[in-house]
Image (cartoon, rainbow, N blue to C red):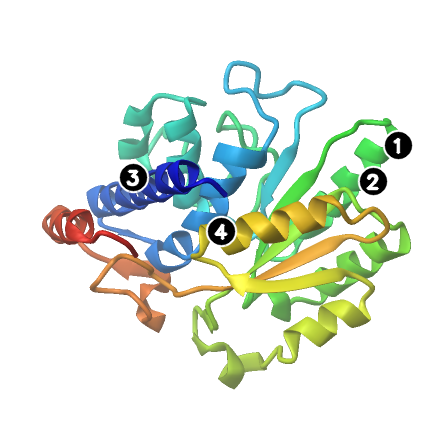
Amino acid sequence: MEAQTLLKLKNQAKEIRKLIISMIGNLGVGHIGGSLSIVEILTILYYKYLNVDPKNPDKMDRDRFVLSKGHAGPALYATLASKGFFPIEWLNTLNQGGTRLPSHCDRTKTPGVDMTAGSLGQGFSAAVGMALGCRLDKLNNHIYCIIGDGESNEGQIWEAAMAASQFKLSNIIAFTDYNKMQIDGYLHVIMNIEDITSKWLSFGWYVQRVNGHDLEQLDFAINRALNEKCRPSMIICDTIKGKGFYPGEGKVESHNMTFDKNMAAEAIEKLEKENDL
């Protein structure tokens, strides 16, 4: 990746991170941890790879993106707003009465959202179905999906994984947000999913593992996944829950955290002073 492109992506990721902190701080409570851990994944997808058009969000040949861990909706909303899918002012209405930005993503409410999510596991199944449907329609596009590591406790994830492998859906590229925490505690205590790489390999997927906050590693992995023509691809992303939000970074309690506008402003100020996350 060229140095100028990398710098632009890093700056964009920082702006998205600031928007997430601000919108949740404005509401006073929200899923800050799992939203901030996927910022770099969303940034490189929407600013380098996804074939999407904010002016025509339903165009037939577009790439699709499914946020199966739907509670990280604020991260997707901040990204979509920054891309121009809807006015950035909407972010201040997060999860409030009459909003078009509910706590969990809803395709009937928000421009640019391809699949409603909330019941963990279902978004991934829908993404696999989209991949099969697009192939049947002979569309030369890709389906991208982010699942959570806690979400991977759901049996439905592995049913969908088997189906994608069975149908050789090389047009789906999935990411596991592997921040190693979930709502009730640490993943290895609640339901350990290691060896996660071997698990996905055993289900017939092409698997890579990267630092989920390293844009160059993500770029390399996505390129390799796009060149895989026989199997679905899983990119396991080692991430930090609450990345960039100092009161909650690396903490289980950031899953759904209470904080006000003042704390948000302080966190954003600190973030702005950092040269590199």
Residue located 62% across and 77% down the image: 193
Few, some or many residues within 10 Å of mark 2 (<14, 14–19, 20+): many
Q: Which residue is mark 1?
A: 136
The percent position of residue 203, horizontal first and vertical second, equals: 80, 67
Q: Is residue 99 visible?
A: yes
Of the numbered discs 1 and 4, the one sitting upstream in the chain is: 1
The kind of residue on which mark 1 rests is Leu
Disc ID at residue 216: 4
Q: Quadrant of residue 78?
A: top left
Residue placed under numbered mark 3 in the picture? 15
Under mark 4, the amino acid is Glu
Give residue 132's mark. 2
Name the side, left or right, on which 229 lies relative to 89.
Answer: right
Q: Earlier in the sequence, mark 3 or mark 4?
A: 3
Distance Cα–Cα, label 2 vs label 4 = 29 Å
112 lies left or right of 164: left
Give the CA separation, mark 3 to mark 2. Answer: 35 Å
On the image, which quarter does residue 8 sit in? top left
Q: Earlier in the sequence, mark 2 or mark 4?
A: 2
What count of labels does the image hold?
4
Q: Point out the frontmost of discs 3 and 4.
A: 4
Residue at 48% across / 73% down in the picture? 180
x then y, percent, for residue 150: 54, 68
Residue 77 in which image quadrant: top left
Q: CA distance from mark 3 to mark 1?
A: 38 Å
Q: Residues within 10 Å of mark 3 (few under 14, many from 20)?
A: some
Amino acid of disc 3: Glu
Mark in front: 1 vs 4: 4
Question: How many angstroms separate mark 1 from mark 4 (CA)?
Answer: 33 Å
Residue type marked 2: Leu
